[in-house]
Amino acid sequence: MSDERMPPINDELLYSVEPYKIKVVEPLRATTLIERKVAIETAGYNPILLRAEDVFIDLLTDSGTGAMSDRQWAGMMLGDEAYAGSKNFYHLQATVREHYGYRHIVPTHQGRGAEHILSQMLIKPGDYVPGNMYFPSTRLHQELAGGTFVDVIVDGSYDPANSMPFKGNVDLAKFDALIARVGAERIPYISLAATVNMAGGQPISMANLRAVRELADAHGIRVVLDAARAVENAYFIQQREDGHRHKRVADILLAMCALTDASTMSGKKDALVNIGGWLAVNDDALYEQASNLALAYEGLHTYGGLAGRDMEAMALGIRESVQEEHIHARVRQVEYLGEKLRERGIPIVEPVGGHAVYLDARRFLPHIEQTEFPAHRLAVELYMEAGIRSVERGILSAGRNAQTGEHNPAALELVRLAIPRRVYTQSHLDLVALAIERVYRRRETLRGLKLVHEPNHLRFFQARFELL
Ligand SMILES: *Cc1c(COP(=O)(O)O)cnc(C)c1O
């Protein structure tokens, strides 16, 4: 065949290939089945308590587990470690203003540092904080400040098989009903996650965000964005929402942020760093108060618990995160794993999210009662099968009601396979799909788990179990 007849390289296809090559490698150690059985037993059948070196493919989280670029590592050498007014702070401030658009930022050691400051500033005991599902640390800080979280996400989010494109949307009727029930003065803000981790990494649409803004404005309620994965959300808007196909992800991100008053950020997600975060606000008085609280809990308002070099890496990471090639390859890699599982008939949450594929444990292990932790059991089995670490997002993560002592209800019972950014290759993901298929074939032989040690807060981190 002559060159003229070769098909042109398809832009889409080219973009789905990793837009980077590997410069530094970190060896992985394969373990034997016996080693894994001992390791997981020692860890109280809780994969979070495993030593990382006993894990072969670590899909526990995409938080702080990404690979930095050569430019980010070079930036680490440009750390200005002045106690006050480090030049890296000003670089970070300028970069957040350019790409997220907020007027003021306070760096924090990670996302929850920002959530803490925000919750302490805005929530009074007895307040209600609506949100499109909850994130554990976000809800915990709301509760520690005396607030009550109220879920106002659309019902479709609770159905893993429902493949609507924007499962992160707010149900405006639910938000309106809450306002009518408790009064707008008891609602300091609505907390919007983009994307919604607990729903499966699902996006909120621009149209919904705008409608939430209008309803909130009508009642004088602030809108706060949890921006940890807002770039991934912006990518889904570009791909799925009418009128956005030809916009740049960077512009969509700015437009999303412009519809909100403030945001908390975990730089460990979209922003491609191993540690860091920020609180961003537009209001001058709120900024004044936030810098003051940062002093007590994080550090001076120009470093907030970070080294100058960390702020530099984060500023550079933000720039890389909004590049079209990067975000396309990032989300497509997650979709690739989803496709491999779908082909094998494995029950997953549809559509596949921006940062993770979620196994639906209710359909995977229908014979295990929810109080015997089917999703967590599945995560344990995946570790035993091939050294793959994943995490439960179901009844264990939902915790207990402090008043009644009952498990909080968890409509979804999922195992999250979170994909770190720029870390694993396609063959790693092929192994993951194969391992899950093998567990699926023997699913009927699995039994549940019994909780034998349970901490008070965020129990999934330290709980211990026995096999039933
Ligand atoms: C990770 C995360 C947080 C908390 O951030 P940390 O950096 O882990 O403290 C809050 N919200 C969402 C959606 C997150 O993914």
Image (cartoon, rainbow, N blue to C red):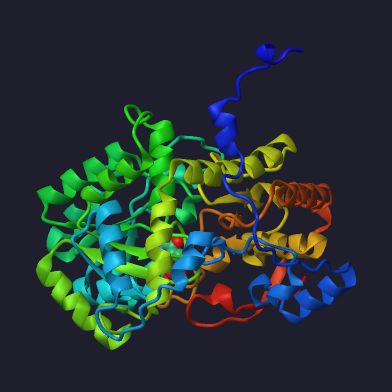
| Residue 335 vertical position relative to residue 407 in the rendered view, above or below | above
- Residue at the (76%, 62%) spot, across then down: 381
Against 270, residue 325 (above or below) is above
Q: Where is residue 44 in the image (x, y as percent from the top left)?
A: 71, 79
Q: In this view, does 263 lie to the left or right of 136?
A: left
* Residue 337 location, quadrant: top right
Residue 408 visible to the viewer: no
The location of residue 361, given as percent across then percent down, is: 65, 53
Q: Which of 318 and 416 is in front in this view?
A: 318
The count of marks equals: 0
Q: In which quarter of the image is ligand 1?
A: bottom left
| In-image side of 291 versus 399 (left or right) | left
Using residue 436 as the reference point, say whether residue 88 is left or right of it.
left
Q: Quadrant of residue 386?
A: bottom right
Residue 451 in the image: state x and y as whole percent.
65, 76
Q: In which quarter of the image is the N terminus?
A: top right
Q: Relative to the observer, which residue lies in front, 80 or 396? A: 80
Residue 249 placement (x, y as % from top left)? 37, 41
Q: Residue placed at 11% from the left, 55% from the top?
A: 220
The quadrant in which the C terminus is found is bottom right
User: Looking at the image, can residue 128 be seen?
Assistant: yes
Q: Name the residue at the front extreme.
A: 3
Residue visible at 40% across and 76% down in the picture = 79
Which residue is pictured at 19% across the width and 54% down the height?
179
Vertical relation: 89 (above or below) 340: below
